[in-house]
Amino acid sequence: MSNSSKAAPDPIFAVEHLSLAYSARRGQPAAPILKDVSFTVECGQALTLVGPSGSGKSSLLRCLNRLEEPSAGEVRFEGRDVQSLDPRRLRRDAAMVMQSPVLFEGTVRDNLRLCPAGTGGDFSEARLARTLGEVGLDKELLERDASTLSGGEKQRVTIARALLGDPRVLLLDEPTSALDPPNAALVVETVSRLCEMRGLTIVAATHQPELIRRLGGMLMYLVRGEVRAYERVDQLAARADDRLHAFLAGERTAEGLAS
Amino acid sequence: MNPGVIDLSVWQLGLALLLVVAVAIVSMRQALGLERDLALGAVRTIVQLYGVGLILAAVFAAAQWYWVVLILVAMISVATHAAVSRLTKPLPGAYTIAAVALTVSTAATLAYVIFVVVQVRPWYEPQYIIPIAGMILGSSMTSAALAGERLQGELRARAAEVETRLVLGFSGREAVQPLVRSALRAAMIPTVNGMMTVGLVQLPGMMTGQILAGSSPLVAIRYQIVVMFMLAAATAIGSLIFVHLAVRCYLTPAHQLRRYLL
């Protein structure tokens, strides 16, 4: 929603030389989590983050919506330094879906309508039903006690809850890794469709080759906080004899990428 | 002076010590390994109480406000240390937080009881202010420690829930509100339960002491009623201040949860 001058619109995210180190504890040096990471995410584009556990994928996502404070570098959201934005506004515009879905006491409807007092938004029955439909859930579910849902349903409700805030980008932190394969496949399908049909910008940390292929866009391979590869997914997929390629083809696990 | 009180001689104390000796014998026979601690405990009981007795006797005799204030400050310092040492994980600034919580809760409750309720004149009359302050401080200390411990536990267990609220655009304060509530409840429930059973399960120490010292039980219960109400206030104020200051350490102005402190 930036000024529509003749120049190209600002990218959703422009990250420059981002480093993150957790604050040093008494007697211990600061542990580096991310080292000099730079990239941009254009509107409507997808970026997937892959890498072994502990490589900094989650931390990178958490810097984008400012759950984490970088120790160096800059994150710009639609052309503006995130430091200059109200974090609450930023987090609604860059909505995050966490690894393990957290739903609160109450019905699915209560959970979908959960938002800070004073924030506007359309929470009409029609919109709730439509949004549930977008994540592949039936509107009958609105009445259900949230605690009775399956893992896959819970994760899709959290995605619907994120969509209701009208985000400009969705940040997904390993959205399928806490789910069994059939439920994971449903979430992959849901997210892929949001990207393909709605043209929603998505930044996702994931180990699902299927999701990476369908999101397309760029892929960033992180190891111990450093960028080892940053390439277009379609080019990777076209190239044979490559570890990332083998990973995308589902022949390798993400942990195997590190070796 | 009161015909009801029998002054205890050193020999009588020695006879009481025989009770501990008997426990030590049981401990040896049963191989409980508690003899050393029992001996140390007995010695500390004697030394600490004699020490306090001598100091209090001096303060009572002098009856000067500055001695009374000095004793109160010393009591608050010890209580602060005790409250902080009960936290399972260190919290930066815990000493300051505990000191503020205990000082404010004690000062506020004590002032109300001394000036308004009991109307002690002069206000620093050690016979009233010191035991009353001790009871208030004991409760505030326990409740602050309980509240702090519970807050830490809740934050550890429910960090994902807090961050889910942050991600939905809630402020840091709003995100931790349910956890703060549960910490405050945990801190205040023992006092509320105490009010339910007082006099039925056991006679409170102060009331027992007053009756032993020759007061009529009807006078003693009136004091005890005041004490129960004042302890409810002290626990509430102490835990409220402690939790609200402590929770600020876990949040940043940018509505972030400092996970490395958990």
Image (cartoon, coloured by chain):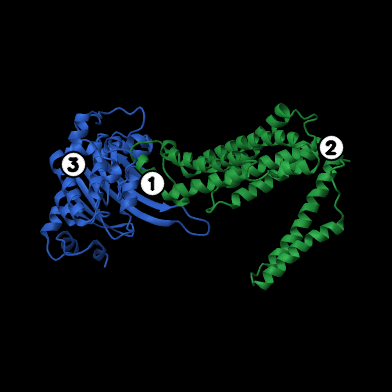
Marked residue chain, label 2:
B
Q: CA distance from mark 1 to mark 3?
A: 32 Å
Q: In the shown orientation, is residue A48 left or right of residue B151?
A: left
Q: Colour of chain A?
A: blue
Crowding at label 3, few (<14), some or many (≥20) Cα neighbours within 10 Å?
A: some
**For the residues tagged 2 and 1, is the chain the same?**
no
Query: What chain is tagged by disc 3?
Result: A
**Which quadrant would residue B175 be assigned to in this image?**
top left
For mark 2, what is the residue? Answer: B63
Label 3 belongs to which residue? Answer: A137
Mark 1, chain letter? A
Identify the amino acid type marked 1: Glu
Between A202 and B150, the residue placed more toward the observer is B150
Q: Secondary structure at mark 1?
A: loop
Disc 1 residue crowd, few under 14, some 14–19, many 20+, Cα 10 Å: many
Q: Earlier in the sequence, mark 1 or mark 3?
A: 1
Q: Is A207 situated left or right of B250 in this image?
A: left
Kindly identify the amino acid type of the residue bearing the numbered disc 2: Ala
Whether residue B106 is visible, yes or no, is yes
Cβ–Cβ under 8 Å for marks 1 and 3: no
Residue indicated by mark 1? A68
